[in-house]
Amino acid sequence: MSEIFNVSTNPHVRSGNTTQTIMRDVLIALTPASIFGIVNFGLDALLRIVIGIVTCVACEALYQYFMHKKVTVTDLSAAVTGLLIALNIPSTLNVGFEIVGCVFAIIVVKQLFGGLGQNFMQNELKRLTRSERTHRLCTRAGMLETFLKEPTVLTDEDVMELLTFIFQSETVQKKLNLLIESRRETLTTDGSENPLF
């Protein structure tokens, strides 16, 4: 057993894709949505897209230049950030707000925390999403257990069989669809909750 193993950190599977090719593919994938936005909202949408991309690229280049770091705007990640910001704001929003958002995204969120892939927001959003999902699953599992007469006696397969039996009922499916529709209407009118969580 004299084999020597090479232990390394992830990623363990590598490909020839560079950050630039991945970001280029993201820009290509966002092109139809951008065109759709321009068609629907006119030149204001185009202006937001141009301002978003130019501001993000310029901020990243200037920050890296003045901090004596390698200028990495050719990796296109700043362009993706600018486009995503532009696609997520109303076309009627004051341009100044967009510029402030772009500066904040690049300087504060991205560069001050170490650059691409190092920002704190990315990990925090994943943690919050995971935490909210875990809370929801625990709450709903608790609700289900209140209806089971002896939950410790039943196996997971028993509970799945019971749920399958219940949800095959046409009456239950109608009620479920009504609840979903009602909830969607509530979410779209008050906007207080995210329907994905």
Image (spheres, helix red, strand yellow):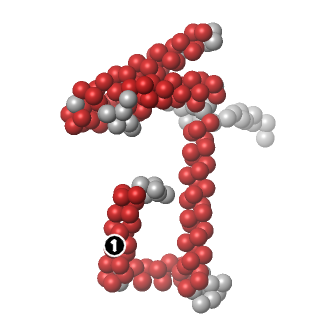
Which quadrant of the rendered structure holds the N terminus? top right
- Direction from residue 23 to residue 69 in the image, left or right: right
Residue at the far bottom in the pictured view? 149
**Above-or-below relation of 47 to 127:** above
Residue at the far right in the pictured view? 2
Residue 171, image x and y in percent?
Answer: 33, 84
Residue 140 placement: quadrant: bottom right
Determine the residue positioned at 64% across, 28% down: 113
Determine the residue positioned at 61% across, 49% down: 127
Residue 67 placement: quadrant: top right
Q: Please name the amino acid that badge 1 sits on.
A: Asn
> Closest to the observer: 196 or 90?
90
**Above-or-below relation of 189 to 99:** below
Determine the residue positioned at 22% across, 30% down: 42
Residue 105, image x and y in percent?
Answer: 52, 29
Task: Say whether residue 196 is visible.
Answer: no
Residue 41, image x and y in percent?
Answer: 24, 35
Residue 151 placement: quadrant: bottom right
- Neighbourhood count class around disc 1 (C-alpha, 10 Å): few under 14, some 14–19, many 20 upward: few
- Direction from residue 45 to residue 117 in the image, left or right: right
Residue 101, image x and y in percent?
Answer: 48, 29
Q: What is the count of numbered marks?
A: 1
> Closest to the observer: 102 or 35?
102
Q: Is label 1 in a helix, a strand or a loop?
A: helix
Identify residue for label 1. 177
